[in-house]
Image (cartoon, rainbow, N blue to C red):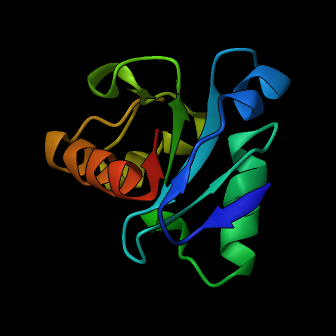
Amino acid sequence: MKIINESISLEKKLAEESFGDFVKAVVDIEIEIMSIGGELHADEEYLLLNEGSRQENLWGINIYPFNDIDKRIEFDSMINVRPRQNNRTRGVENPDLQSKIIEITNKLITN
């Protein structure tokens, strides 16, 4: 696992070595950083929390580096279930929040 705070090229090898076609990631929408490469989103969340992130700013996604950029991000993680933040599913229900996550991810991950 590692924290990404500047633009990198996501190596497709990382996806192949972990889940075959995707990489789990957690995005901090306030600091605009992410962690990648964990087996669970919770592991990546824990890494960011230890670096000073606040849990309410962390959202789990899956990145499919083999897909076109508009189909690269999947909003699906248990850490996203947050009734107190009006998010009751594993997805990210707020379209503005989805856009923010996509923007950060596209800024940090290039292919």
The answer to which quarter of the image holds residue 77 is: top right
**Vertical placement of residue 89 versus 30, above or below:** above
The quarter of the picture where the N terminus appears is bottom right
Position of residue 56 in the picture relative to residue 36 (left or right): left
Position of residue 37 in the picture relative to residue 33 (left or right): right
Q: Which residue is pictured at 27% across the width and 35% down the height?
A: 93
Q: Which residue is pictured at 75% across the width and 78% down the height?
A: 50
Question: Foreground: 52 or 33?
Answer: 33
Question: Foreground: 80 or 72?
Answer: 72
Q: Where in the figure is residue 89, as x and y percent of width and height?
A: 42, 29
Residue placed furthest toward the bottom: 52
**Vertical placement of residue 110 versus 77, above or below:** below
Question: Foreground: 83 or 14?
Answer: 14
**Vertical placement of residue 22 versus 86, above or below:** above
Residue placed furthest toward the left: 96
Position of residue 58 in the picture relative to residue 42 (left or right): left
Q: Which residue is pictured at 77% across the width and 21% down the height?
A: 16
Q: Where in the figure is residue 21, as x and y percent of width and height?
A: 65, 16
Q: Which residue is pictured at 46% across the width and 65% down the height?
A: 56
Q: Where in the figure is residue 65, as x and y percent of width and height?
A: 53, 27
**Vertical placement of residue 70 versus 55, above or below:** above
Callout count: 0
Position of residue 11 in the picture relative to residue 68 (left or right): right
Q: Where in the figure is residue 13, as x and y percent of width and height?
A: 75, 29
